[in-house]
Image (spheres, grey):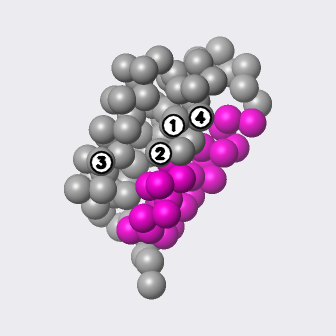
Amino acid sequence: MYERLTDPAAIDSANRYFNDLIALADPAEQLPFLRPQVEDFRFEVLNHNGMLSIQNQLRGFLWGLLVAGVLTPEQGRDLSQRLEVGRQTGWL
């Protein structure tokens, strides 16, 4: 069974990732459906740690933002790499 994140550093890293994702994807707060979706991902990561399907969904979400022109290729690559680091360090 998947568990909640309990390590304060991991929680901080996860929250920082999602805050940065929102800030990069919607700095002018003009995408009303973006924040609720990102908050759903945040909830899943914080409460069901270790689910590979969440990482896969996040990657698809990032690709969608990239294809839609919401993120630049560099931003998409950076956020994708941070997902990989999150997997390695235990917050994802």
Q: Badge 1: few (under 14), some or many (20 or more) residues near its Cα, within 10 Å? A: many
Q: Earlier in the sequence, mark 4 or mark 2?
A: 2
Q: Badge 2: few (under 14), some or many (20 or more) residues near its Cα, within 10 Å? A: some
Where does label 3 land, which residue?
84
Residues under numbered marks 3 and 2 in contact, where contact means CB atoms less than 8 Å apart: no
The amino acid type found where label 1 is placed reads Leu
Q: Quadrant of the C terminus?
A: bottom left
- Secondary structure under the numbered disc 2 in the rendered image: helix
Q: Earlier in the sequence, mark 1 or mark 3?
A: 1
Position in image of residue 50 (x %, y %):
38, 68
Q: Earlier in the sequence, mark 3 or mark 4?
A: 4
- Secondary structure under the numbered disc 3 in the rendered image: helix
Residues under numbered marks 1 and 3 in contact, where contact means CB atoms less than 8 Å apart: no
Q: Residue at x 74, y 36 (%)?
A: 33
The amino acid type found where label 4 is placed reads Gly
Gap in Å between the C-alphas at discs 1 and 3? 13 Å
- Which mark, residue 62? 1
Where does label 4 land, which residue?
64
Residues under numbered marks 4 and 1 in contact, where contact means CB atoms less than 8 Å apart: yes
